[in-house]
Image: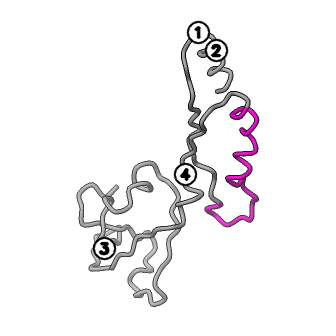
Amino acid sequence: MVKVIDEVRAQGFNISYLNIGGGLGIDYYHTGNVLPTPRDLIDTVREAVLSRNLNLIVEPGRSMIGNTCGLVLRLIGMKTNDTKNFSVVDASMAELMRPSFYGAYHVRFFHSVIPIYSLFIGLKILFLSCSSG
């Protein structure tokens, strides 16, 4: 990106910001992998940014906010047909869009007392919204 900034500046344009986005990784599966830290990211771009007198913009990304929220819902009913078992919950895709939109991984925790009927093989979850993914 700084090469592009150099080229654009050479054409007479004044660029003073570099937005490197965000999205440092999260160890979703708790594999113990060592992931880059915000300090690692800054250390990588520091010289290029300082030498060009650029203002750096960094978005927090999932690494900083990914573990700060959760969806709490209640099982409010069960539905069964000949081949499938469904649980009906009091939430919808509106409260947690990411997994439904593009299949993103999302950790699931269950209350310590799980009703036996929620352990069916092939259980599907039905949300209260038609657009439930």
Quadrant including the C terminus? bottom left
Compared to residue 42, the image places residue 11 above or below, namely above
Identity of the amino acid at label 1?
Gln
Identity of the amino acid at label 2?
Glu
Identity of the amino acid at label 3?
Val
**Residue 7's mark?**
2
* CA–CA distance in space, label 2 to label 1: 7 Å
**Residue 89's mark?**
3
Of tags 4 and 2, the one toward the viewer is 2
Of tags 3 and 1, the one toward the viewer is 1
Q: Earlier in the sequence, mark 4 or mark 2?
A: 2
The crowd level at tag 2 (other Cα within 10 Å; few <14, some 14-19, many 20+) is few
Q: Earlier in the sequence, mark 3 or mark 1?
A: 1
* CA–CA distance in space, label 4 to label 2: 29 Å
What residue is drawn where x is 50% and y is 71%?
A: 108
Q: Which residue, given by chain and number where applicable, does mark 4 sit on?
A: 61
